[in-house]
């Protein structure tokens, strides 16, 4: 059975439902899950040709039909020529580093990025001679000043975790390309529903499919999106050799999750904005970080880049005389919740509350956390799909016990 080819110009919501490999001879309407480590070849000559060229399916560490469907769907939604899956978001970043960088190369990185990303570049690859300069997420001049002749990559996450800082993707792309470097953007928080970084000049888009792409906190997955040249000549050889391969089952789960991505992301944004506005009115809250609020420093930029929506993640800060006092208040609010889940994932249908200084950024030094603006009084809320007033009521259980 041969599929009808999809017409040009379909919107992301439609691509999220329809893009996949051709149906099998059985004509399934829901994409098939291919659980097989190996694929039988019709003859020895074909086997030799496929192993040599990389075309066709031979071994699951190289390619799998279900993983291909996931890759095609994500590339279509991001507007890139190709995509390649990985075992996790961090696995995707590892793939990018191994494919693009060598000893003596230099990277410019936002100091506000996810803690594990900071450590992967500075600690793990620093010992192999890759040099990293950390700069302000929002200061374009600081990015520009950090570039060297040896700079090969600029990497930003926008909005950031957990303070939702927004960078100017187009401005960073201009800096990168002027230096002969590439710009990579972590698009986990916004997803292609809110922003498509390559339309603003980015060369590579990174995803942790574990987050919004899945949407229900079920599996680990990651991906890089970019040109055919980058994917086939740079990234794919690393996956074949190093094995950070995405499992077919996980690919299938995320593939199905992406079908509802547009509906979910818009609902997450609506709920998060309602909760953020409510938090701003609470006397116990010193500050709210949510780029959908007019009070956010990069609000106008975020609205331009993110289709007028702020995303589903916010953070707020509780004041404390000392770091110990602020941490005690944060723990009290978190522990008082009876609806919100105390966990560290995001993008889930269930609202998740966490303390970044002791979880996602707990392995950073205190100096690194301070540079990223993360205090002991910071609480992150990844807003889910519950009724927003129930989320507010749950937070008030803890806030009501604090002195304003």
Image: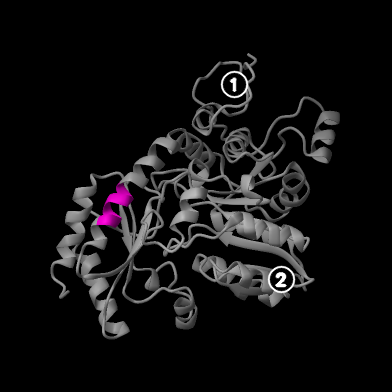
Distance of label 2 from label 1 (alpha carbons): 47 Å
Residue 305 drawn at (x, y percent)? 52, 49
| 85 horizontally vs 212: left or right | right
Say above or below: 140 vs 70.
below
Is mark 2 in CB contact (under 8 Å) with mark 1? no
Q: Dot 1, how many residues are within 10 Å of its Cα: few (below 14), some (14-19), or many (20+)?
A: some
Residue 18 drawn at (x, y percent)? 54, 26
* Residue assigned mark 1: 23
Q: Residue at x 48, y 57 (%)?
A: 159
Residue 84 drawn at (x, y percent)? 65, 44
* Residue assigned mark 2: 147
Q: Nearer the viewer, residue 324 or 128?
A: 324
What are the residue bounds of the magenta stretch? 271-277
Element class at badge 1 = loop
| Residue at the bottom extreme of this rendering | 322
Q: Which of 151 and 276 is in front in this view?
A: 276
Q: Residue at x 25, y 60 (%)?
A: 279
Numbered label tally: 2
Q: Residue at x 70, y 43 (%)?
A: 62
Inspect the magenta stretch and tell me whether residue 312 lies in it. Answer: no
Q: In which quarter of the image is residue 404?
A: bottom left
Q: In which quarter of the image is residue 373?
A: bottom left
| 119 horizontally vs 44: left or right | left
Q: Nearer the viewer, residue 58 or 193?
A: 193
Element class at badge 2 = loop
Inspect the magenta stretch and tell me whether residue 274 lies in it. Answer: yes
């Amino acid at each position: 059975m041969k599929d009808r080819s999809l017409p040009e110009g379909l919107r992301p919501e439609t691509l999220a439902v329809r893009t996949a490999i051709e149906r099998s001879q059985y004509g399934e309407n829901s994409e098939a899950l291919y659980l097989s480590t190996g694929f039988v070849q019709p003859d020895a000559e074909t086997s030799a040709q496929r192993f040599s060229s990389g075309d066709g399916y031979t071994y699951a560490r190289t390619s799998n039909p279900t993983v291909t469907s996931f890759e095609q769907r994500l590339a279509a939604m991001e507007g890139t020529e190709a995509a390649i899956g990985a075992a996790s978001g961090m696995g995707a970043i590892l793939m990018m580093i191994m494919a693009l960088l060598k000893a003596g190369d230099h990277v410019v990185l936002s100091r506000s990025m996810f803690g594990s990303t900071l450590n992967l570049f500075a600690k793990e690859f620093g010992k192999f001679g890759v040099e990293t300069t950390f700069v302000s997420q929002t200061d374009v001049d600081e990015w520009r000043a950090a570039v060297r002749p040896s700079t090969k990559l600029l990497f930003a996450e926008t909005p950031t975790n957990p303070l939702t800082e927004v960078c100017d993707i187009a401005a960073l792309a201009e800096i990168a390309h002027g230096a002969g470097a590439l710009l990579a953007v972590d698009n986990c928080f916004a997803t292609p529903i809110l922003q498509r970084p390559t339309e603003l000049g980015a060369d590579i888009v990174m995803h942790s499919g574990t987050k919004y792409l899945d949407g229900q906190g079920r599996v680990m997955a990651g991906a890089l999106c970019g040109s055919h040249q980058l994917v086939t000549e740079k990234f794919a050889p690393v996956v074949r050799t190093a094995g950070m391969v995405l499992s077919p089952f996980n690919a299938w789960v995320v593939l199905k999750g992406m079908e509802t991505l547009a509906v979910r992301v818009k609902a997450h944004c609506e709920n998060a904005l309602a909760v953020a506005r409510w938090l701003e009115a609470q006397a116990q809250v010193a500050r709210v970080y949510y780029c959908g609020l007019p009070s956010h420093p990069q609000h106008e930029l975020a609205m331009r880049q993110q289709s007028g929506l702020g995303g589903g993640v916010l953070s707020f800060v509780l004041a404390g005389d000392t770091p110990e006092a602020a941490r005690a208040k944060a723990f009290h609010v978190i522990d008082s919740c009876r609806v919100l889940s105390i966990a560290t994932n995001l993008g889930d249908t269930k609202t998740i509350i966490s303390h970044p200084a002791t979880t996602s950024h707990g392995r950073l030094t205190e100096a690194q956390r301070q540079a990223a603006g993360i205090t002991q009084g910071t609480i992150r809320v990844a807003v889910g799909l519950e009724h927003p007033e129930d989320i507010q009521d749950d937070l008030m259980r803890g806030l009501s016990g604090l002195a304003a």
